Structure formats: structure tokens, C-alpha cells
Image (cartoon, rainbow, N blue to C red):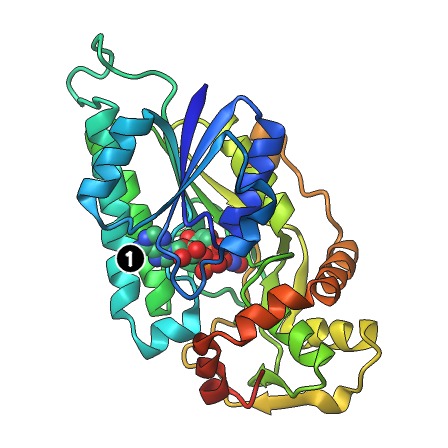
Amino acid sequence: METILVTGGAGFIGSNFIKHILQEHPDSYIVNLDLLTYAGNLENLKEIENNENYTFIKGDIRDRELVDNIFSEFRIKKVVHFAAESHVDRSIEDPEIFLSTNILGTQVLLDAAKKHWKINPDDKYCDEYIDNVKYLQVSTDEVYGALGKEGKFSEDLPLLPNSPYSASKASADLIVRAYHKTFGLPINITRCSNNYGPYQFPEKLIPLMIINCIKDKELPVYGDGMQIRDWLHVKDHCSAIETVLYKGRIGEIYNIGGNNEKANIEIVQLIISTLGKSNNLIKYVKDRPGHDRRYAIDNTKITTELGWKPSYTFEQGMKETIEWYLNNTEWINNIISNDYMKYYEKMYSGI
Ligand SMILES: NC(=O)c1ccc[n+]([C@@H]2O[C@H](COP(=O)([O-])OP(=O)(O)OC[C@H]3O[C@@H](n4cnc5c(N)ncnc54)[C@H](O)[C@@H]3O)[C@@H](O)[C@H]2O)c1
């Protein structure tokens, strides 16, 4: 049985990924290392918490001793690294934790992988070298910066991040690349566009707007609302990461996108009309500093080389997502009662 260390598995994408792998690869064992910051929520994993192929460990990826012990005890063969501070607005308010978690936390995991997988640049294939191991870094299209009206992000573009969040993710990507080039660590990096779907913490656009709209609260839209993102259903993201984990060529970067370019205001209007509410709920607020105007992903490499493609249309994915939030009021109410939501009272007149 192969053991996979998933970091940040109590967050939005990580929790969806763990459920996906336990279903698709019942011969795998998953260790979920998560600090349970404001964004981590064990309720996301309720349906698999007693699965015999799953262990949760509350802890910090920056804790070297803990990470080292996990590698020894569970004989980790693969790492899928989701854990991060992930919200751009918070990185503008306080960049420090982003640099610490996203950059130095990544280095701790890389060092443990290098040590336990007996990676040696001069003798990669020595008897002790562990085969079939891989470190997968989950990154973001935001590392490429912003696009104009035309063009898409391909994997060979320079990294030009604009926010402290995206700069921390770009830094981590470069360190991962360096551990591959210098030490021969078998790695992949995936860079995906904006995700949406069940279990997303309601600080991000889609859950924030759905929940506010359900509760007839104002819908705070940054600037003119014409910022364009390329939306990806979280389940499509999980199947893409699975594909790269098992089939990706070592050392390669793969972009993952859903071919769904939408302006923020279009999404807000779709949510309003699906829920039968009024456009009067929309409140334009001061734009985010350094707000990137447009992202779009060229996913030719992963589709042609690895045969992955997204399965959700945006319309279907949004319909299911809105229904999920309508049907999971307990999950929502538990989060909203959390102190961290006070942050939003300060940011917007939101939830
Ligand atoms: N959500 C998106 O649209 C999106 C898009 C592109 C890339 N990504 C990347 O995907 C990954 C997952 O994103 P998400 O939206 O699920 O994030 P999230 O904020 O929902 O979850 C992050 C998880 O990491 C955990 N965590 C934070 N610091 C930790 C630490 N020091 N040690 C251990 N655990 C820690 C949190 O408790 C939480 O469970 C991130 O690396 C993010 O940069 C996300």
C-alpha cells in the first residue's frame, strides 16, 4: 500500500482531493497534515474520517521534527502539497505569514523528501534510492501575473507575481524547481486557475456571493467587476492533480484550467438570477490594490500529453455549487459563527 502525505487536507481543495483519491485509489493510504488555521475545517472530511486508509495529524508544515517523524513512521512515498495561506486580501493586510508558511513550509517538506527518499545528485540510482516517489507542488496561475485582453498563460512564461500571496507561491515554485535541478528530487508543479465548488471557505468570490445572496446581504464587488478569471470546478482540479501525480513527467510543470473565462460581475449576476434575487444587492466597493485584470490558462500541455480534460461546464458546476450551499446551511452557519468572519465585517459590510 502506498502512503501519500497530503498537506492542507482540511482546506477546500485538499479535502476534496482526499475524498477523490480514497475513492479512485482504494489501495492508497493518506496522511493529512493540517494546522487547522481559520481555513481548515475537519467537517469537510466527516464522511471519510473513520476510513481505515486515512489518518489526520494536526500540525504545522514548518515543524521539521514533526514532518521528519511523519516521513519515517508512515514511509511516505508521495507528497501533494496544498497547505498554504491562500487569500490575496489577507496577504495585502499581513504578508509575513504568507512568506513563512508558503515559502519556508515548502522548504521543510522538500528537505524531508530529499532526506527520506535518499536523493543523492551523484548517485541517484544507488541501491537505497526509493523508486516511484514524487513531490507535487500545488501552485497557482497567479504566479504569471496579469494578462491583457489577449493571450493565455503557458508553462514557459516568466513568473511576474503581483501580490504578496502570488509572490510567495512563485518563490515556492522556484525552490521546488531548484530541488529538482540541484538534488534530482522527482517533482511536478501544477498551476491552476480559480477553483469553485463545495466546501470553499466563504472569503472567496463564489461562496461569499452565494451565501450573502441567500441571506439577502449586500454583494461587495471590487472596482468595476470586470476582472476576468478562468474558473475550474474543484473536482476537475482534483482529477487533474491525480493525473499529474501518476502520469506527469518528472520535473515538468502543468497548467490546469477549465476554459471558463468569466468577469466577476457576470458570476455575481448568474448567482443572483439562479437564486431569484435582485441586482440591487450589488454594491461596488473600492478595488483591491494591484488587482490583476485577467487570467486565462492554456491547458494544451496537460490535455495533449496526459489526456486530462475538464468534465464540468461552468453552468452545470455553478448549478451544483449553488445547490450545495443551499443544502449545507449547518456547515455555513458553523463557519459564520467563527470569530474569523469578523474580518469580513471589517472588509465589507458582508456576512
Ligand atoms: N482556491 C483556489 O482557487 C486556488 C487556485 C490556485 C491555487 N490554489 C492553491 O491550492 C492550495 C489549496 O488551496 P485552498 O483554496 O484549498 O486553500 P484553503 O485556504 O482552503 O486551505 C489551506 C489549508 O492549509 C492549512 N494550513 C495553512 N497553513 C498551514 C501550516 N503552516 N501547516 C499545515 N497546514 C496549514 C489550513 O489549515 C487549510 O486547511 C493552496 O496552495 C493554494 O495556493 C488555490
Asked if residue 6 is positioned above or below residue 349 in the image, the reply reads: above
Residue reaching furthest top? 127
Observer able to see residue 135: yes
Using the image as rendered, state which of residue 312 and residue 71 is in the foreground. 71
Q: Position of residue 344 (x, y in %)?
A: 49, 82
Residue at screen point 23% across, 26% down: 116
Q: In the image as oriented, which residue stretches furthest toward the right? A: 276
Q: Is residue 277 above or below residue 9?
A: below
Which residue is tagged 1?
Answer: 101
Q: Residues within 10 Å of mark 1 (few under 14, many from 20)?
A: many
Does the numbered disc 1 mark a residue whose Cβ is under 8 Å from ligand 1? yes
Find the residue positioned furthest to the left: 122
Nearest to the observer: residue 55 or residue 125: 55
Q: Residue at x 31, y 50 (%)?
A: 59
Quarter of the picture containing the C terminus is bottom right
Going 23% across and 34% down the picture, which residue do you hit? 69
